[in-house]
Amino acid sequence: MKAAEHKKYLFEICEKIDLDLESPTCKKLKEHLAQCPDCAAYYDSLKKTIVLYRNYEVEMQGSRVTEILSRLDLEDDADAKGHLKIKLPKKPDA
Amino acid sequence: MEDDTKLIAASKAGDKKAFGQLVKKYEQLVYSFSFKICRDKNKAEEVLQETFINAYRGLNSFSGNSKFSTWLYRIVTNNCLMMHRKKSHEPVVSIEEADLFKGTDELQIPHWGETPQDVVLNKELKDVLDRAIQKLPLDYRIVFVMRDVEGLSTEEVGKTLNLSVPAVKSRLHRARLFLREELNPYFSK
């Protein structure tokens, strides 16, 4: 198969990578992948690239609700009085 | 948990408790999306806080025509872009498509071997994925993360980023190819 013909399929693979190969629009592509090991390897690696990033999750350590609301409170205080009101911590008991 | 419409209406009326519930509901989504764009936990934390502060200030401009999450995606994106412009001194990377034919008429694709799709993402692999995506220009990275990782439709990505559907497809196409090429040496050894 000539380069131009392969290129057509390589473009189609990238366009249809998130579709199910069983869908009717992928019929010709699926047939080509079954008989072209290079395009099949390309399809496989592109699919894995996406799946790897999709599976890479990151969890927050604890909620930030309190910090965010307290920042909003500080901003409200600043808006109301025209300057930022700093909330000092209470003095420790003697 | 109350639905978004009620919480947004209450927040617009100044009910911080309602806004707190919105933060609680969406903070993981915002943090996770920020991290996927910035690839840095400290930056993701900063973007998370700025995003909700901006969201609270701009709540009156949220019309409800899109999902609240989509609106948040837009704010995160703007914050990431601003932070990137302020702090970045990265050289501009060209993302020309790789020559898969190596100057010949033959297609030369290295096989990745057995990489189970549910492969455990250990530290080494995470570093590889982080390094590869950090080389991708931010405009392309955002489209890839929104479309392929977060699962937004091409139309939603276009609306969120003010891009036409062909422009989204073009960036996505290039981003996918770039990342596959960057990961090639790791998986085809």
Image (tube, rainbow, N blue to C red):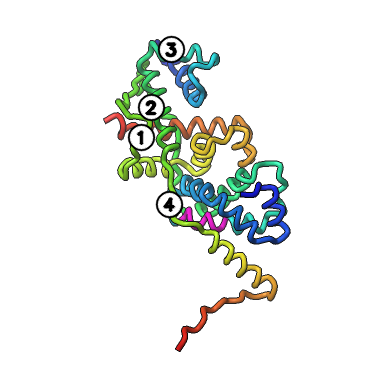
Name the amino acid, label 2: Ser
- Image location of residue B126, percent across then percent down: 35, 43
Disc 3 from disc 4: Cα separation: 41 Å
Q: Residue at x 59, y 32 (%)?
A: B154
Amino acid at circle 4? Asp
Q: State the separation of the CA atoms marked 3 and 1.
A: 24 Å
Residue at left offset 55%, top offset 59%: A65
Looking at the rendering, which quadrant does residue B158 occupy? top right
- State the image coordinates of residue A11 (x, y, percent, origin top left): 48, 22
Q: Looking at the image, is mark 2 or mark 3 earlier in the sequence?
A: 3
For mark 2, name the chain: A
Chain letter of the residue beneath label 4 in the structure image: B
- Separation (CA) of disc 4 from disc 1: 20 Å
Q: Residue furthest front?
A: B1
Q: Which residues are magenta?
A: B43-51
Cβ atoms at labels 1 and 2 below 8 Å apart = yes
Which residue was labeled with disc 1?
Answer: B183
Q: Residue at x 44, y 55 (%)?
A: A61
Q: On the rendered structure, is B67 left or right of B171? A: right
Circle 3: residue type: His
Outermost residue on the bottom side: it is A94
The tag on residue A32 is 3
The quarter of the picture where residue B130 lies is: top left
The residue lying toward the viewer, choosing from B182 and B123, is B123
Residue A45 has which mark?
Answer: 2
Label 4 vs 1, first from the N-terminus: 4
Check whether the beta carbons of the residues at disc 4 and disc 2 lie within 8 A of each other: no
**Residue A55 locus on image (x, y percent):** 42, 38
